[in-house]
Image (spheres, coloured by chain):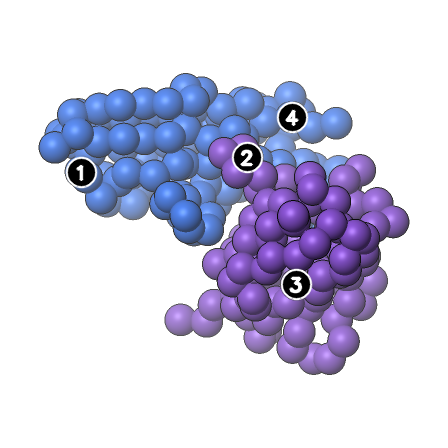
């Protein structure tokens, strides 16, 4: 069964450094998402991406963050100048259809630790 | 903005007992999705409900979507130790086209053998 994959599984970085989290969505999916989950808390929406552009972003997704689909398979989240509070699990998700049948499948996540 | 509330936060049951978690949205939803997350794992899709009043079953799991499309529930009959995990509901609002999911806080289910 097709799956969303993410790399790396764990990223440790120093505060102020830039990180790039990578995702390979399910191949025939057109809608891509990033979510994050701070330890012990609920999953929070960051951004959605369709047709090579951001379609919606949350208030969390400020100028520190950017997304890109550099080729036909990868979808990346870049965090510039990381802060301690960016430590969280970052999940990529993808979907084949738009609303209302927008079932989203999540990848295994990248645990980001900012020291 | 849209808020999704989920109760209870924790539920401890003996194996064989039933379990229910409830989800309530501040706004009418286009659809609601349910996910299960094991400790250290990622949200795994369980089901999506789209129609008002919809009821779907998966073996021992019964999912319900309210008539007003603002609330939902997940009921597990005769829990097993394999049901342990956090169950999240996640709603999609009518006003967004591209599927932002707003998650509830989740219900952590523990099952004692």
Crowding at dot 2, Cα within 10 Å, few <14 / some 14-19 / many 20+, comes out as some
Q: Same chain for marks 3 and 1?
A: no
Q: Which chain is purple?
A: A
| Label 1 chain ID | B
Seen from the viewer's position, the closer of residues B75 and A12 is A12
Q: Which mark is residue A21?
A: 3
Q: Which mark is residue A42?
A: 2
Vertical position of residue A78 compared to residue A99: above or below: below
Q: Residue at x 54, y 59 (%)?
A: A10
Give the Cα distance between marks 3 and 1.
36 Å
Q: Label 4, on which residue?
A: B3
Q: Earlier in the sequence, mark 2 or mark 3?
A: 3
Q: Label 1, on which residue?
A: B80
Rendered location of residue B29, percent (x, y): 62, 33
Seen from the viewer's position, the closer of residues A41 and A99 is A41
| Label 2 chain ID | A
Crowding at dot 3, Cα within 10 Å, few <14 / some 14-19 / many 20+, comes out as many
Rendered location of residue B21, percent (x, y): 38, 25
């Amino acid at each position: 069964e097709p799956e969303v994959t993410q790399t790396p599984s764990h990223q440790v970085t120093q505060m102020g450094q830039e990180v790039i989290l990578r995702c390979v969505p399910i191949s025939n999916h057109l809608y891509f998402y990033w979510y994050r989950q701070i330890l012990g808390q609920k999953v929070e929406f960051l951004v959605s991406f369709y047709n090579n552009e951001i379609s919606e972003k949350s208030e969390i997704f400020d100028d520190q963050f950017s997304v890109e689909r550099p080729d036909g398979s990868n979808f990346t989240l870049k965090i510039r100048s990381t802060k301690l509070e960016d430590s969280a699990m970052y999940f990529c998700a993808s979907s084949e259809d738009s609303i209302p049948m927008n079932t989203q499948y999540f990848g295994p996540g990248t645990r980001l630790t900012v020291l | 903005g849209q808020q999704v509330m989920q109760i209870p936060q924790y539920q401890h049951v003996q194996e064989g007992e039933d379990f229910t978690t409830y989800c309530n949205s501040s706004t009418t939803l286009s659809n609601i999705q349910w996910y299960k997350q094991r400790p250290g794992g990622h949200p795994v899709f369980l089901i999506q409900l789209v129609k008002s009043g919809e009821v779907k079953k998966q073996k021992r799991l019964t999912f319900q979507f309210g008539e007003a499309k603002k609330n939902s529930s997940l009921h597990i009959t005769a829990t097993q130790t394999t049901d342990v995990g956090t169950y999240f509901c996640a709603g999609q609002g009518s006003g967004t086209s591209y599927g932002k999911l707003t998650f509830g806080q989740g219900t952590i289910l523990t099952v004692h053998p």
